[in-house]
């Protein structure tokens, strides 16, 4: 599913965040230490190789809502933007912190003249954020931030499961 808003294509697909070869920057749902882990962070670090962890080490730790940028290393992407999403029920206010992840990643990408960016569903895996409210926050933040962007022309949400894809497509159609 695709929508165009403020001249930016916003789309949802099912796939592997580490396999988005047509995207300039992918977003890592990182841990505070910016090191390999499970889920999205593990997939990205495995595909990027050990150079990613070495580059990230001096930038850590980061706090929930913060975004930092690194090179893509062995990934097909030029950049990785690392965001620490909130742990649902622990990091509060979780909705604001989750919105900060999306907003800060988009603004950082735009500052670096990135034209395309792919996001996973930040905080919805091991961090326990319910998928539908997380998708609502993501798409509202993308909508509200898109008018500030000068370089980004494509924003892709890459979802791991069919259920997550269907929820994101439903929410995207309601918000945009």
Image (cartoon, rainbow, N blue to C red):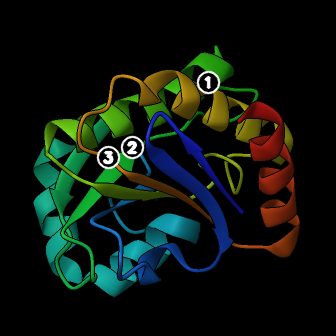
CB contact under 8 Å: marks 1 and 3: no
Q: Which residue is mark 1?
A: 91
Task: State the image coordinates of residue 32 (x, y, percent, origin top left).
Answer: 39, 43
The alpha-carbon separation of the residues under discs 3 and 2 comes to 26 Å
Task: State the image coordinates of residue 88 (x, y, percent, origin top left).
Answer: 72, 33
Place residue 38 in its image quadrant.
bottom right
Which callout, 2 or 1, points at the residue further toward the start of the chain?
A: 2
Task: State the image coordinates of residue 9 (x, y, percent, origin top left).
Answer: 50, 52
Mark 1 or 3, which is nearer the eye? 3
Place residue 91 in its image quadrant.
top right
Identify which residue is drawn at 44% across, 84% down.
Answer: 19
Neighbour tally class for label 2: few under 14, some 14-19, many 20 plus, Cα within 10 Å: some
Task: State the image coordinates of residue 72 (x, y, percent, origin top left).
Answer: 21, 71
Is 158 left, or right, of 28 in this rendering? Answer: right
Mark 3 or 2, which is nearer the eye? 3
Identify which residue is drawn at 35% across, 70% down.
Answer: 23
Secondary structure of residue under mark 3: loop
Q: Nearer the viewer, residue 159 or 8?
A: 8
Neighbour tally class for label 1: few under 14, some 14-19, many 20 plus, Cα within 10 Å: some
Q: Which residue is mark 2?
A: 32
The answer to whether residue 65 shows anywhere in this view is no
Q: Which residue is mark 3?
A: 152
The answer to whether residue 41 shows anywhere in this view is yes
Which callout, 3 or 2, points at the residue further toward the start of the chain?
A: 2
Which callout, 1 or 3, points at the residue further toward the start of the chain?
A: 1
Secondary structure of residue under mark 2: loop
Q: Quadrant of the N terminus?
A: bottom right
CB contact under 8 Å: marks 2 and 1: no
């Amino acid at each position: 599913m695709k929508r165009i808003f403020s001249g930016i294509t916003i789309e949802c697909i099912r796939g592997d965040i580490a396999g988005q070869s047509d995207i300039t920057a992918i977003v890592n749902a990182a841990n505070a230490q910016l090191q390999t882990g499970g889920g999205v962070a593990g997939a990205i670090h495995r595909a990027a190789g050990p150079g990613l962890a070495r580059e990230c080490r001096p930038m850590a730790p980061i706090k929930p809502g913060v975004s930092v940028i690194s090179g893509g290393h062995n990934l097909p992407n030029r950049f990785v933007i690392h965001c620490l999403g909130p742990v649902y029920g622990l990091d509060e206010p979780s909705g604001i912190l989750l919105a900060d992840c999306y907003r800060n990643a988009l603004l950082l990408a735009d500052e670096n003249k990135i034209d395309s960016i792919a996001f996973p569903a930040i905080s919805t895996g091991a961090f326990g954020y319910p998928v539908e409210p997380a998708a609502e926050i993501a798409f509202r933040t993308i909508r509200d931030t898109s008018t500030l962007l000068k370089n980004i022309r494509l924003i892709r949400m890459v979802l791991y499961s069919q259920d997550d894809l269907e929820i994101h497509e439903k929410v995207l159609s309601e918000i945009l």
